[in-house]
Image (tube, rainbow, N blue to C red):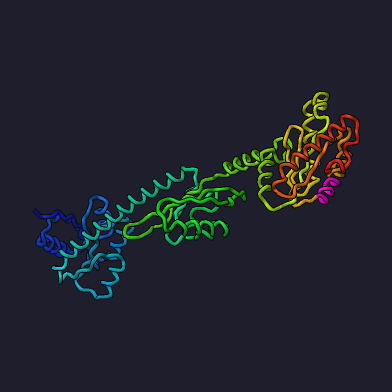
C-alpha cells in the first residue's frame, strides 16, 4: 500500500509540476498535489489544507523560491521545504539552505527528489516529536514551579557546581533577589559570606553520605531582619550523570529559637526580679564545688519586714521591695559573681576567687550600694539582714553556705531584738 503524500508544488510551469508528481509516484507515494505559482496562491493553499511537503521552484516570473520560503517562515510553519531548479550555481543553493530550505534538488537530477522528501519528512517528524517533548517538559516544569510557588517554605535548586538554577517566590521574598537575578549565581553571591561558608561546609560534610541532610544557620532577610533557619538539602541525579545538582529548602525556626531561649531563661532566672533562681544557684554551687576557683565566698541576704510590707501596703509593694533588693545585690557584686533569689525573701551570692579580705571589701560595696539606692527610693527604704562566709576548698563549701545563712539569721534576730546586728564584723565572723 502506497504512502499518502500531500505535496504543495510552487511552480509556474505545469509540465514541470507534473514531472515532480510522476517522480514521487514512481518513488512509492500516493501523491495528492496542488500547484501554486505566486505568493497569493501559496498563501491560499497553506490556509486551506494540510501539507506534508512543499516543493518550490527557485526562480519564477515575479516570484521566487526564497520569497516562498519567507512566507512559510512568517506563518510559523515547519512543513519540509525543498527548493528545485533547472540550473543554478552552488552559491545560490547554499543561500537557500542557509535561508531554511531542507534540501536543494536540480530538475535534471530528479532521482534525488524521493530520498530528499523522505529524509525531510523524517527530520520534520523528529523535530515535531522533540517540540512535543519540550512542551511536555515545559508543562511539567511550569506545574512544578506553580506548586513550589504556593509553598510558604523558601525552596531553591543548584547545579553540581553550586550555581543557582531557580527558586520559588518564598525564597525570592526572603532573600530579596528576583528569580531571574539569582540564576547562575553562586551561594556566595546570594548569602552572606559566613553563612555561605557554613552552607558549603554542610554540603561537603554530607558528600560522603546519602539522603537528605540539614544544618542550622542564621540569614539576613531582605527586610534586614535576622532569621534562624534550618537548611534542608538533597542531591538529585540526571540520567547518565552522577549528580544533577542540589535541591534545598529553608525552614524558619526563629520563633522556636526564641521560645527555647525564653524557656532556658525561665529555667535559670527568677521571673519577678530577673536575677538567677534557686535551681541555677544550686547548679553553680555544685560546679564551684568541683572547680578550682577557691577560695569561694558566699553571701546570704534576707529582706527585712517583707511580711509587714505585704500586710500593710499590699503584695505589689512587697514585690517592689524584692526587685529593689535584687537591684542592689546585682549592682554591688562583680559580673562573674552569681546573684540569685533562693527563697521568698532570701537572696544569695556566690563569689569565686574571693578570700576573706576581698569578701570584707565586697560587703563594704554592698553597704554603700544599699545606702545609695535607699536615697532614691524614699520613703520605701530597703533593709537587708546579711551573713557571709568563705570556703577554702570544695569540702568546706556547703558548710560555709550554712554558716553564712546562720550569720544572716543571727543578724535578723538581733535587729528584731533591737541590737546593732548590722555591723560588718558580725557579717563575716
Magenta run includes residue 234: no
Magenta stretch prevailing secondary structure: helix
354 lies left or right of 426: left
Q: Nearer the viewer, residue 4 or 75?
A: 4
How many labels, in total? 0
**Figure check: 376 above or below 18:** above
Q: Nearer the viewer, residue 210 or 60?
A: 210
Q: Nearer the viewer, residue 159 or 210?
A: 210
Dividing the picture into quadrants, the one containing residue 412 is top right
Residue at 79 percent of width and 38 percent of height? 301
Residue at 40 percent of width and 54 percent of height? 210
Image position, residue 391 (x, y; %): 75, 47
Image position, residue 267 (x, y; %): 64, 39
Image position, residue 14 (x, y; %): 16, 62
Image position, residue 209 (x, y; %): 41, 55
Residue at 77 percent of width and 37 percent of height? 405
Q: Residue pushed farthest top?
A: 311
395 lies left or right of 407: left
Quadrant location of the C terminus?
top right
Magenta run includes residue 362: yes
**Figure check: 170 above or below 81:** above
For the question of whether residue 326 can be seen, the reply is no
Residue at 28 percent of width and 72 percent of height? 94
- Read off the magenta span: 356-365
Q: Nearer the viewer, residue 335 or 7?
A: 335
For the question of whether residue 212 can be seen, the reply is yes
Amino acid at each position: 500500500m502506497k504512502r499518502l503524500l500531500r505535496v504543495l508544488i510552487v511552480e509556474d510551469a505545469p509540465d514541470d509540476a507534473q514531472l515532480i508528481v510522476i517522480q514521487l509516484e514512481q518513488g512509492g507515494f500516493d501523491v495528492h498535489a496542488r500547484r501554486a505559482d505566486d505568493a497569493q496562491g501559496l498563501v491560499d493553499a497553506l490556509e486551506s489544507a494540510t501539507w506534508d511537503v512543499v516543493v518550490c521552484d527557485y526562480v519564477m516570473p515575479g516570484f521566487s523560491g526564497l520569497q516562498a520560503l519567507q512566507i512559510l517562515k512568517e506563518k510559523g510553519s515547519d512543513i519540509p521545504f525543498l527548493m528545485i531548479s533547472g540550473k543554478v550555481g552552488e552559491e545560490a543553493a547554499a543561500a537557500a539552505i542557509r535561508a531554511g530550505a531542507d534540501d536543494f534538488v536540480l530538475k535534471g537530477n530528479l532521482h534525488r527528489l524521493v530520498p530528499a522528501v523522505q529524509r525531510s519528512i523524517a527530520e520534520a517528524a523528529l523535530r515535531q516529536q522533540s517540540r512535543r517533548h519540550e512542551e511536555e517538559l515545559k508543562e511539567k516544569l511550569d506545574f512544578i514551579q506553580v506548586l513550589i510557588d504556593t509553598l510558604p517554605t523558601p525552596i531553591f535548586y543548584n547545579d553540581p557546581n553550586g550555581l543557582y538554577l531557580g527558586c520559588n517566590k518564598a525564597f525570592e521574598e526572603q532573600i530579596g533577589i528576583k528569580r531571574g537575578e539569582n540564576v547562575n549565581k553562586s551561594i556566595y553571591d546570594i548569602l552572606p559570606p559566613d553563612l555561605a561558608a557554613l552552607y558549603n561546609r554542610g554540603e561537603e560534610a554530607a558528600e560522603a553520605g546519602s539522603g537528605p541532610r540539614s544544618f542550622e544557620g542564621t540569614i539576613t532577610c531582605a527586610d534586614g531582619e535576622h532569621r534562624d533557619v534550618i537548611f534542608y538539602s538533597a542531591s538529585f541525579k540526571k540520567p547518565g550523570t552522577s549528580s544533577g545538582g542540589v535541591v534545598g529548602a529553608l525552614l524558619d525556626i526563629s520563633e522556636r529559637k526564641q521560645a527555647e531561649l525564653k524557656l532556658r531563661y525561665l529555667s535559670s532566672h527568677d521571673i519577678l526580679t530577673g536575677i538567677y533562681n534557686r535551681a541555677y544557684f544550686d547548679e553553680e554551687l555544685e560546679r564551684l564545688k568541683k572547680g578550682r576557683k577557691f577560695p569561694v565566698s558566699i553571701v546570704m541576704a534576707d529582706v527585712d519586714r517583707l511580711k509587714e510590707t505585704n500586710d500593710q501596703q499590699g503584695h505589689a509593694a512587697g514585690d517592689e521591695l524584692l526587685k529593689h533588693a535584687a537591684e542592689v545585690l546585682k549592682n554591688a557584686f562583680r559580673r562573674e559573681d552569681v546573684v540569685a533569689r533562693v527563697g521568698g525573701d532570701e537572696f544569695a551570692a556566690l563569689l569565686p576567687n574571693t578570700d576573706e579580705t576581698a569578701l570584707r571589701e565586697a560587703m563594704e560595696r554592698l553597704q554603700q550600694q544599699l545606702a545609695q539606692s535607699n536615697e532614691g527610693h524614699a520613703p520605701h527604704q530597703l533593709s537587708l539582714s546579711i551573713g557571709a562566709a568563705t570556703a577554702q576548698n570544695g569540702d568546706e563549701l556547703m558548710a560555709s553556705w550554712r554558716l553564712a545563712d546562720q550569720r544572716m539569721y543571727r543578724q535578723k534576730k538581733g535587729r528584731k531584738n533591737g541590737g546593732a546586728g548590722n555591723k560588718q564584723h558580725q557579717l563575716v565572723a
